[in-house]
Image (cartoon, helix red, strand yellow):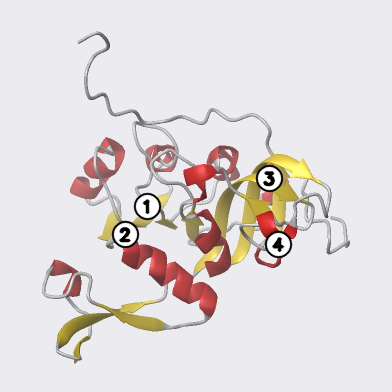
C-alpha cells in the first residue's frame, strides 16, 4: 500500500475490506436502496466475516442491498430506524436469529453525529414516555421530559460517494448523501466506494460535502445497479 497520505486509493474492494474482522460494528450508508455502497456490501459477504452488528437506516429492502448480509447469516444484531417491507429482517427478527434495536431516525443520525463529535451522550425528547424510553435515564429540563441517548460509534463505515479525490474529499449525489457523511465521521475506519475518482484539487473546496480527513480508504467503482424503490400511486392512463 502506498505511504503517500494524500492518496488513499486501494486497488480492489477485496483489499479495501481486508481489515474487517468478526464481531465488528459496521455503519453502512444508504436510505432504502438510495446511496448504498453496493460493491462493498457484496464484498463483505465474500470477505467471510460474521457476527456483525450492522447500523443502517433499514438494513436493505426488496431482497437487495444489506438483505444480502441477512441472507448470508452474517449479522448478529441490527440497529436501525425502519423495518417496513424488509421481509428478510422481519423473518429473522421473529425467529430470534437477529437481534434488532429500533431507534427513531433522527436519534439514530444524532447518535452517530455525537460519536463523530466526541459527545458521549445527549438528551432528546424523541421517544420520551414511549417504549423507546425503556432502560434509559430520563430527566425533566425546563418542564419537558427528555431521555438520554448514547453516542453510536462504529469500527468501520461503508460509504458511497459520487465523487472522491485521492485524499478522500467527497461529494454525494442528491439524497444519496443521507447517512453516508455522518457515518464516516463516527467510525474508526471509513471505506469509501466512489463512482468518479478525481485528482486532488479537482473538487472545489466549497463543493466538498465531507472532508477527506474522515476517509481512510477509497475504491473506485464506476458501475452500479443503483436500484430504486418506487411507490406507484396510480396506473398510467388511469
Q: Can you identify the residue that label 2 sits on?
A: 105
Q: Position of residue 200 (x, y in %)?
A: 83, 54
* Disc on res. 212: 4
- Callout 2–callout 1 Cβ contact below 8 Å: yes
Secondary structure of the residue carrying numbered label 4: helix
First in residue order: circle 3 vs circle 4: 3
The crowding category of the residue bearing disc 1, from other C-alpha atoms within 10 Å (few below 14, some 14 to 19, many at least 20), is: many
- Callout 2–callout 3 Cβ contact below 8 Å: no
Pick whichever, 180 or 96, lies toward us.
Answer: 180
* Disc on res. 57: 1
Secondary structure of the residue carrying numbered label 2: helix
Q: Residue at x 69, y 59 (%)?
A: 206
Secondary structure of the residue carrying numbered label 1: loop
The crowding category of the residue bearing disc 3, from other C-alpha atoms within 10 Å (few below 14, some 14 to 19, many at least 20), is: many
Q: Residue at x 22, y 85 (%)?
A: 137
Locate residue 105: give its quadrant.
Answer: bottom left
Marks 2 and 4, how far apart in space?
A: 26 Å
The residue mark sitting in front, 1 or 3, is: 3
Q: On screen, 23 above or below 63?
A: below
Q: Is residue 207 left or right of residue 112?
A: right
First in residue order: circle 2 vs circle 1: 1
Q: Can you identify the residue that label 3 sits on?
A: 163
Amino acid at each position: 500500500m502506498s505511504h503517500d497520505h494524500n492518496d488513499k486509493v486501494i486497488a480492489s474492494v477485496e483489499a479495501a475490506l481486508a481489515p474487517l474482522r468478526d464481531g465488528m460494528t459496521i455503519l453502512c450508508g444508504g436510505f432504502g436502496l438510495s446511496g448504498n455502497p453496493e460493491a462493498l456490501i457484496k464484498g463483505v459477504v465474500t470477505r467471510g466475516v460474521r457476527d456483525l452488528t450492522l447500523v443502517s437506516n433499514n438494513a436493505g429492502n426488496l431482497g437487495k442491498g444489506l438483505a444480502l448480509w441477512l441472507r448470508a447469516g452474517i449479522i448478529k444484531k441490527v440497529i436501525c430506524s425502519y423495518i417496513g417491507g424488509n421481509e428478510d429482517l422481519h423473518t429473522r427478527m421473529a425467529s430470534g436469529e437477529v437481534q434488532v434495536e429500533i431507534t427513531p431516525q433522527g436519534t439514530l443520525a444524532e447518535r452517530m453525529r455525537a460519536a463523530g463529535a466526541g459527545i458521549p451522550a445527549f438528551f432528546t425528547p424523541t421517544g420520551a414516555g414511549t417504549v423507546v424510553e425503556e432502560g434509559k435515564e430520563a430527566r425533566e429540563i425546563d418542564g419537558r421530559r427528555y431521555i438520554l441517548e448514547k453516542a453510536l460509534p462504529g469500527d468501520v463505515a461503508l460509504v458511497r460517494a459520487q465523487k472522491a479525490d485521492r485524499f478522500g474529499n467527497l461529494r454525494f449525489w442528491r439524497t444519496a448523501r443521507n447517512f453516508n457523511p455522518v457515518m464516516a465521521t463516527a467510525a474508526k475506519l471509513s471505506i469509501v466506494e466512489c463512482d468518479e475518482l478525481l485528482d486532488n484539487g479537482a473538487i472545489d473546496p466549497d463543493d466538498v460535502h465531507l472532508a477527506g480527513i474522515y476517509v481512510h480508504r477509497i475504491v473506485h467503482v464506476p458501475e452500479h445497479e443503483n436500484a430504486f424503490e418506487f411507490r406507484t400511486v396510480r396506473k398510467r392512463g388511469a
